[in-house]
Amino acid sequence: MTSGDPVQPPRRVDRAGIVIAALLAVLAVVLVWDTRVLQTTTMYGMGPEVMPVVVASGLALLAIGNFIDALRGSLPARESADPVPVALILVGLALLIAIIGFGGGFIMATSALFVTTSAAFGRRAILVDAIIALVMSTLIYLAFDRLLTLSLPTGLLERLL
């Protein structure tokens, strides 16, 4: 070190980073464990158990990288979190689950999620967002239902199409 260099404080282990790394590792293990109990009916090639293992591998790599960076203290400083946007997105997810659970269908459920998420990002044009959400959700539903012939949860709006 030269005499003109500022003295840098010693890096500290980032405990929150270690917790995040542990959670990522646990999620990877749960995915692999859950994949083991899948009933495969594939007679050839790859079955449905391949993709969860790929995702679990990615999570494991993220856990390792996060753990190393946490030990080195080289994770970026976290910004303070505003709880309102997080709460709005959680409300949107709860609405999505509730609407589908009570038979409201894909279009209404994803529209509710879209509107609450856009509000979480600071947009206040709720009526315009609702119209955009209904149009986009309907187009997505039609693409999955008619073009890909995959079934999505149906409700009143889906039965009208």
Image (tube, rainbow, N blue to C red):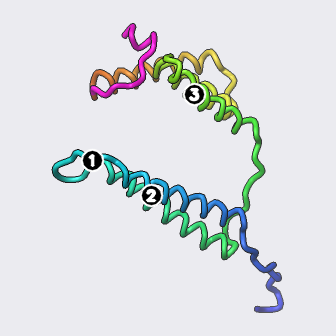
Nearest to the observer: residue 81 or residue 35: 35
Q: Position of residue 8 (x, y in %)?
A: 79, 80
Which numbered disc, 1 or 2, marks the residue closer to the eye?
Answer: 1
Nearest to the observer: residue 142 or residue 28: 28
Residue 128 visible in the snapshot: yes
Q: Residue at x 76, y 91 (%)?
A: 1
Give residue 127's quadrant in the image. Answer: top right
Instruction: Compare marks 2 and 3 and give the one earlier in the sequence.
Output: 2
Assign the magenta stretch its main secondary structure. loop
Q: Residue at x 43, y 51 (%)?
A: 34
Q: Residue at x 74, y 53 (%)?
A: 79
* Amino acid type assigned to the residue bearing label 2 in the image: Ala
Q: Position of residue 130 (x, y in %)?
A: 58, 18
Q: Which residue is mark 1?
A: 40
Which numbered disc, 3 or 1, marks the residue closer to the eye?
Answer: 1
Residue 118 visible in the snapshot: no
Which mark, residue 56?
2
Which mark, residue 113?
3
- Tell me the magenta residue range: 149-161
Give residue 119's quadrant in the image. Answer: top right
Instruction: Compare marks 3 and 1 and give the one earlier in the sequence.
Output: 1
* Amino acid type assigned to the residue bearing label 1 in the image: Thr
Total marks shown come to 3
User: What's the CA distance linking mark 1 and mark 2?
Assistant: 18 Å
Which numbered disc, 2 or 3, marks the residue closer to the eye?
Answer: 2
